[in-house]
Structure formats: structure tokens, C-alpha cells
Amino acid sequence: MFSYKMTEMWTTMGSTLASFMFIWAIIRQYCPYQLLRFFEKYSHRIMDYFYPYIRISFHEFLGDRLKRSDAYGAVEAYLSANTSKSAKRLKAEIGKDSTNLVLTMDEYERVTDDYKGVKVYWVCSKVMSQSRSMPYYQEQEKRFYKLTFHKKYRDTITGSYLDHVMKEGKEIRLRNRQRKLYTNSPGYKWPSYKQTMWSHIVFEHPATFETMAMEPQKKKEIIEDLVTFSKSKDFYARIGKAWKRGYLLFGPPGTGKSTMIAAMANLLGYDVYDLELTAVKDNTELRKLLIETTSKSIIVIEDIDCSLDLTGQRKKKGESKFFSDDENENKANFDAVRKEVKEEGSGSGSGGGNSKVTLSGLLNFIDGIWSACGGERLIVFTTNYVEKLDPALIRRGRMDKHIELSYCSFNGFKVLANNYLRVENHALFESIERLIGEVKITPADVAENLMPKSPMDDADKCLSNLIEALSDKKAEEVKKSSGLINEQDEEVEHFSPIKENGEVVGDEKEDDQAMKQIQR
Ligand SMILES: Nc1ncnc2c1ncn2[C@@H]1O[C@H](COP(=O)(O)OP(=O)(O)OP(=O)(O)O)[C@@H](O)[C@H]1O
Ligand SMILES: [Mg+2]
């Protein structure tokens, strides 16, 4: 009896729906557009009147889709933790420290959640839509989560459930967050639907401040500065300043600038955005990249002096291999000749590929109105030639803290000896202390000498290697200072450009021509 009634009910419902669809198809076929809009509008209203459920959507990208929605991210994290047991189709991704798997709902999956006795429904969905910003037809994925609940629970859901989801979701996100190293390098071809200009890998650099070779006092000061910054959200809000801080790291090659960036990221738990300026087309693209960065991140521009012709006296990184002392006169002559050669050859003095990023664009990137979006961000520049940078670029307020990384001190050596050899004291330390005070040696060189070269190499052997290297350096420096070696001759002797079929190629060509002019 019961099953008969059910069958009758389903049949009636089915035929009603079929009739409705048929009438609707006729209306769509023959009605003028205005009448159709009218029907659509009112049919929605009638449906809404009888439909007792409320729906809220959380879209991944809002408005003009410049930035991923925080609400979407929080919902995703909340659902992955709370509903992954009930969902039947899940996506798995490696979580923090590459140890655990994080499960999230797969597309079109539906799950329920209970909150204070109220049942709500979540659906993960996506639609394809045509991008408005693209010059030609291109489809983009629009992903969203949809929350559905009965209208009688409106107050409970909008009043406290959503707050609960956001709060818990953000906490879970922070807990599970696997830090990332982003790059805007053009080597990767973006799929047409890809929303972001950054690509990333997991950030796994092991550097920490403990393993950094530098004066303990200076190290302590930098750590305190960073930690204070990360806890100063309210302070920055009170003084009306965007929550960001600029660091300029300068010093000779191999003194630990890049290592310090990794140590900073590990100390604060931030992501790293490695910005390759020469790959940025123009100022607009630079702004877009900035907007796409998240908070709790470090935006890095390495070798800022080589990135673009921002200084008027642009220098290429490769040049440092010709000169041990960047202040010597020969180098200035070489720079001048090289610049002339380049200008003659290309008809333009600017490098940086096809990038049209200007100094003003970069200044705006650092502290323009757009730089405030996101908050809690460090901007770090590194350079080997601080004196070549435009003062506007590195003035306080833009680059708030200038940190010089220099040659290895005895304290720095002790850190490295402990890192590499696990020795805190040794009979050879005294000689090393004396020699290290007399010669300029970078932490990178010290580290290389302390590295065991065979399984048989113990601390004695490695420390003796270092003493030998320091003594050689000292002898070289003595020779130089007594005029026995002419540095210019040395540069010319050491210069051996890359050749293909006997022809010098690439940037080396300019160097080669400059060297030949000097030789003449
Ligand atoms: N201060 C330091 N403490 C510990 N290790 C260091 C330090 N400086 C350099 N090193 C070691 O030397 C290597 C090179 O250092 P790093 O790449 O950080 O130098 P850099 O200053 O960024 O050089 P460049 O100007 O050429 O980019 C690192 O892998 C690290 O092992
Ligand atoms: Mg570096």
C-alpha cells in the first residue's frame, strides 16, 4: 500500500516537472528577450519563496580575481579537517614538513556538518567562465564552496557558525601550512586557466641563525628586530604605517646574504617570493605580482644592482669574477670601457632583457599604496655593490634596516667549526684567530676549507687545511701590497671568456672587447 502511494507520488511529480520543462522550453523559444528576463526574474522569486534553504557561496577569487580569497582558504582548511571523514571523494596533498598527507574534498563532493544541533551542507564546486581580462577567448576555472542551511537557522549560522569556521580554518591553515618558495621565472609556461603569475616549490632550506657565522651581538640584534616586527601588527596600525619592513643586505660574494634570507624565513615561518625583476614586463606586471603575494612572506630581489638599469651605472654580476677589490681603479676603468663597448654594440645602455620596469615602478612596489595589501611582509634586497644603488631606493623607510655581511671573523669561524666539525675548542684555534684577523676571507671560503674531503678527514686535517688556505691568502696579500703583483695584469691573465667555434659569445663578448682595449 505504502509503496503504491510512493510510486503514485513520484509519477505525479515527474509529470508535473516534465510539463513545467515543456512550457519553459516553449517560452524560451518564442518569447521576446525582455519577457524572458521577466519570467526568469519572477520564477527565481517564486522558487525562493517555496525553497526553505539559504545558500552562501565562498569563491576562490573575488572581484577582478587579483588575490585568492582568505575566506575560501579558511573554508577549505576547515572542511579538510572536519569533514574529510565523511566525504567519499577526497584530494590528497603533502602537508607541512612533507611528513603528513592533508585531505580535502574533491570537486562536486557534498558533506554535512553539525553545529550546535544544526545540520548544514557544504558542496565543493567549480564553473568555467570566459575571462574578461584576456584579449582573446579563454576559459578560466572559478572554484567555490557552497554552504546550504535551513532558513530558520539563519541567525545561528550567520551569527556564530561562520565565525567559528573562519577562526578554526585559519588556525588549521597556519598549523598545516607548508612553506613555499615562489618564483616568477618565465621558464614555466602557465596553463591558460592558471590564475597566478607565481610558481612555487616547497621551501626546505635548512639555514638558521644558529648556523650563521657572524658576530653574536649583531645576530642577536637582527633576530630581535625580526621578532619584534612579526609581533607588531597593532603597533603598525596605531602609527598608520603598512605592516612591512625593508632589509638591505650588502657585502662581498659568499658572505651569507642569501643564507640569511633563508634563516629569516625559517625564524618567522614565512614564505619566500624570489622576484626576478628582469622577467617582469612592466610596472603593471610588477604590481600584479605584488598583489598576488600573501602575508607572512619575504619578497626577495637578489643582486638588485644587476637586475635592471635602475642606477644609471648598472653592473653585471659576472663582473665580480674579474675583481677581488671592487674599489680599485682598474675596475672603474674596466666598467667605463665595458659600458662604452656595450653602448656601441647594442645602441642602448640598458640591460635587463625586455623589461620596462622603472625605478619609480620599483619604488611604488616597495612603499606605494598597493604595498600595504596583505600586511606582515618583509622586502629584502641583496647587493654586492651598495654604493652603486640609487639613494632613493635604499633610504630609511623603504629599506629600514641596512645589514652589512662581511668577511669572516674569529667568532664567525667558531660557529662554522662547530657546524662542520662539532668542535668548540682546539689547539689550532689560536693560529686561526691570529691569521683570520690578518686576512680577508669569506665565510663561504672558510666553510669550504672546513668541509671534510674524504671519510678519513678529521677535525685536525680540516683545520690544518684552513690554516694553509689562510697562510696562502696572507702571502698573496703581502705580495700585492708590496706591489709584486699588478692587479690589472692579474685580471687580464685570469680572463678567459666562453667561446663557441673560436668566437666569444654572450655578455662575455663585451668583457672580451673591453679587456682587449685595456690590453692595448
Ligand atoms: N655567514 C655565513 N654563515 C654560514 N654560512 C655561510 C655564511 N656565508 C656564507 N656561508 C656559506 O657559503 C655559501 C654561500 O653563501 P651565500 O650564498 O649566502 O652568499 P651570498 O652573500 O649570498 O653570495 P652572493 O653575493 O654571491 O650571492 C652558503 O651555502 C653557506 O654555506
Ligand atoms: Mg646570494
Image (tube, helix red, strand yellow):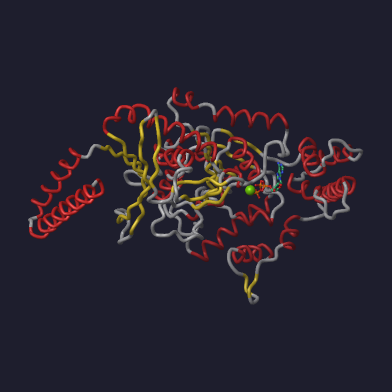
- Point out residue 113 in the picture as x, y percentages from the top left corner: 40, 37
Q: Tell me, yes or no, if residue 190 can be seen here.
A: yes
Q: Tell me, yes or no, if residue 309 can be seen here.
A: no
- Point out residue 44 in the picture as x, y percentages from the top left corner: 17, 44
Q: Is residue 133 left or right of residue 93?
A: left
- Residue most extreme to the bottom: 501
Front-most of 288 and 357? Answer: 288
- Residue most extreme to the front: 1
- Point out residue 163 in the picture as x, y percentages from the top left corner: 39, 30
Q: Quadrant of residue 249?
A: top right
Q: Is residue 513 above or below residue 194?
A: below
Q: Is residue 144 left or right of residue 429?
A: left
The residue drawn where x is 54% and y is 36% is: 175
Front-most of 113 and 363? Answer: 113
The residue drawn where x is 47% and y is 50% is: 90
Front-most of 294 and 2? Answer: 2
Quadrant (top left/top right/bottom left/bottom right) for the C terminus:
bottom right
- Point out residue 271 in the picture as x, y percentages from the top left corner: 54, 42
Q: Quadrant of residue 443?
A: top right
The residue drawn where x is 21% and y is 47% is: 5
